[in-house]
Image: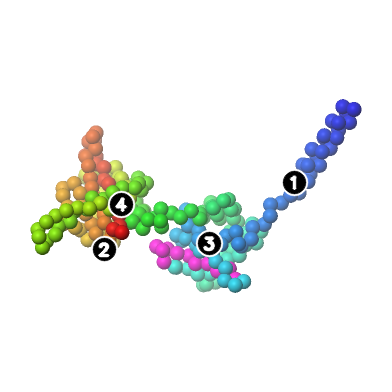
Amino acid sequence: MKKLIHSSLQALVIFLLITGCGLKKPAQTEESFLGKWYAVKGNVEAYSFLKDNNSFILTGTQAMNPVVYGTWKVDKDKFTITLDNGISTTYIYSLSDDTLVFNNGQEIYTQTTPLDVQFPEVRILKDLASDLAMDFSKPQQAEINWNVRYDSANLSGNFLVKGFSVDLRTTQSSGDILKITGYLSDSGFEPDSVNATESYSGFRDDKQLIIVSSYRLAENINDSILVTISSGIIK
């Protein structure tokens, strides 16, 4: 009797293994990809995969502006993008939750909205880090204490603006502060004389405010300083 039960269990296990190996994951359809996908690593900042009647169209953006248009399709494990200029690229893709991976990590996109899209004041901090190749910390929530002067009555005051800040460990002799302030000026931010001292400089572009401040580090090794850049937008 025991031998019979044992044999029956073996037969059941073998049957499950055989049938299990034959199972296939259901193929993804284009509907699984509809929406906006932000680049973690890619040729554009974001793709919008859309459906127009029976066609699947796309828009690729850079600096939040459309730069490429085209169509796209999914065929089993292949994802093909065809641009309006006729260039067509086929990727092997994998899709997991909100992450789309092309060619085993050659390009990676996510549907999680990046911080600089949620909060536009973060974009200049991101651009500073990438364009100047400086090792800034990740953006953290911060407040900007902005000084104002009322010329008509020769009065002054201040107000707080919520925003984000990043830090950079560097040295006074590196010239990094001049590179940062020069970049801000080239990006359209104007120096604000009311917010200017030996340790910090204020910049303004319409409603966006930026403070660049520096502090000597306690260890003071090799004229080391901590530079903090805070960015906020007046609501």
Q: Amino acid at mark 1?
A: Cys
Q: Amino acid at mark 3?
A: Gly
| Image point (54%, 53%), residue name | 98
Q: Amino acid at mark 2?
A: Asp
Q: CA distance from mark 3 to mark 2?
A: 32 Å
Helix, strand or loop status at disc 3: strand
Q: CA distance from mark 2 to mark 4?
A: 16 Å
Query: In front of the other: label 3 or label 1?
Result: 3
Residues at badges 3 and 4 in contact (C-beta under 8 Å)?
A: no
Q: Earlier in the sequence, mark 2 or mark 4?
A: 4
State the colouring used for the structure image.
rainbow
Helix, strand or loop status at disc 4: strand
Query: For residue 27, what is the image quadrant?
Result: bottom right
| Image point (33%, 50%), residue name | 164
Residue 165 in the image: above or below residue 61: above
Q: Earlier in the sequence, mark 3 or mark 2?
A: 3
Q: Earlier in the sequence, mark 3 or mark 4?
A: 3
Q: Which residue is mark 2?
A: 206
Q: Which residue is mark 1?
A: 21
Q: Which residue is mark 3?
A: 35
Q: Say few, some or many: other residues with alpha carbon within 10 Å of mark 3 (under 14 / 14 to 19 / 20 or more).
A: few
Residue 50 in the image: above or below residue 24: below
- As drawn, is 27 to the left or to the right of 184? right
Helix, strand or loop status at disc 1: helix
Q: Is residue 63 magenta?
A: yes
Q: Which residue is mark 4?
A: 162
Q: Earlier in the sequence, mark 3 or mark 1?
A: 1
The disc placed on residue 163 is: none
Q: Say few, some or many: other residues with alpha carbon within 10 Å of mark 2 (under 14 / 14 to 19 / 20 or more).
A: few
